[in-house]
Amino acid sequence: MAAVVDKDVAVVHEIDRIIGDLGADSLDLLDLVFHLERRFGIRISPNGIEKRVKAELGDVPLEIDGVYTPPALALLRAALPEVPPGEFPEGLHSSRLPQVFRVATFVNLVARLKEEQG
């Protein structure tokens, strides 16, 4: 993580937002995913979190006109417990989801994917 955002590892904390606190942009997120996939032998789906939420919602829409529905927001809060619930306000646009990702989001994601691999 620290290398992707060109920061000293001592100043990167699990609660830091990747975009915002650490100064990453969308290309840095792609670079981070690439490094994590290679390092841990996993495959990270670009929309994996949304796909899991959509599967749990069933026939209920994930978003309407790019805005997450209240049931989707509730599931996103549960899927991303490291993100303060207040960062999932009503009216959250799906394009803003990456801005809530924390360092801990990727730590938890890698741990879950490794566990699923067995």
Image (spheres, helix red, strand yellow):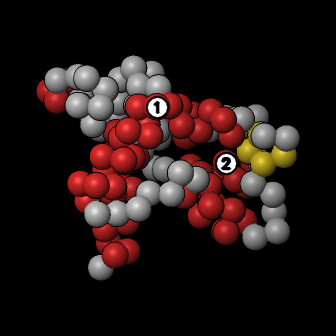
Q: Kindly tell me whether residue 31 is visible in this rendering.
A: yes
Q: How many marks?
A: 2
Q: Judging from the image, what secondary structure is the residue with disc 1 in?
A: helix
The residue identified by callout 1 is 27
Q: Is 100 situated above or below 108?
A: above
Disc assigned to residue 73 = 2
CA neighbours of label 2 inside 10 A, class few (<14), some (14 to 19), many (20+):
many
Q: Is residue 55 left or right of residue 81?
A: right
Residue 73 picture location, percent across and down: 67, 48
Question: What is the quadrant of residue 102 in the picture?
Answer: top left
Residue lying at the far right of the rendered structure: 65
CA neighbours of label 1 inside 10 A, class few (<14), some (14 to 19), many (20+):
few
Position of the C terminus by quadrant: bottom left
Kind of residue at badge 2: Leu
Residue drawn at the location 72% of the way across and 65% of the way down: 57
Look at discs 2 and 1 and give the one toward the viewer. 1
Residue 16 picture location, percent across and down: 35, 30
Residue 37 picture location, percent across and down: 33, 55
- Foreground residue, 88 or 93? 93
Q: Is 9 situated above or below 114?
A: above
Kind of residue at badge 1: Leu
Residue drawn at the location 37% of the way across and 74% of the way down: 116
- Foreground residue, 93 or 37? 37
Q: Earlier in the sequence, mark 2 or mark 1?
A: 1
